[in-house]
Amino acid sequence: MKVGLGGFLLAASGVWLYGEFQTPPAERMFWVPAVALGGSFWVLFDAWADFAQDRRLDGRRFHTSEPDDDLNASDVMLLSQHAHLIANALREEPKTVGELADECDLTGSRVREAINVAGSDETIYPVDRNTDQPRYALDEGKMGASGVG
């Protein structure tokens, strides 16, 4: 969809810019079609970045054959609340799943589920993987406004 929109905008702004060259020099207004041309390139580069980062508009992945996890809105909200509780608990020091479960008043499976979701972008990451009960830490650089981008 983005590629089609970007292609249409590119063609339209290119024709518009060509039309400006056909007008008398005193009446030319190049900046409007040039901005439109730049916007069309931005849309095309954004579509390319989505493809390169394996993202689609509907949230699914391009190159996966396994079915998507179907989470409803309440599941997502509950999972984000659990991840928030765990992130707050990890601000002080790294902790194990059992320590996090006790501190956050959650079950171990809920803690592991939230860590798996927050760990996909390494916001919560294991400190010592080689032990029976690894401790997890929080990368605060990926949290909040400082983690945007």
Image (tube, helix red, strand yellow):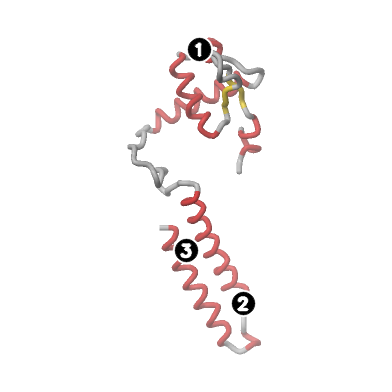
Q: Residues within 10 Å of mark 3 (few under 14, many from 20)?
A: many
**CA gap, disc 1 and disc 2:** 62 Å
Seen from the viewer's position, the closer of residues 139 and 75 is 139
Q: Is residue 104 visible?
A: no
Q: Residue 105: which disc?
A: 1
Which residue is located at x 46 percent, y 26 percent? 79
Seen from the viewer's position, the closer of residues 29 and 137 is 137
Which residue is denoted by mark 3 in the rendering?
A: 6
Which residue is located at x 66 percent, y 37 percent? 146
Which residue is located at x 45 percent, y 66 percent? 7
Q: Residues within 10 Å of mark 1 (few under 14, many from 20)?
A: few
Q: Residue 79: which disc?
A: none
- Say which label, 2 or 3, has the lower sequence index: 3
Which residue is located at x 57 percent, y 87 percent? 23
Instruction: Tally the numbered discs.
Output: 3
Q: Pinpoint residue 11: horizontal percent, then vertical percent.
A: 47, 72
SS at mark 1? loop
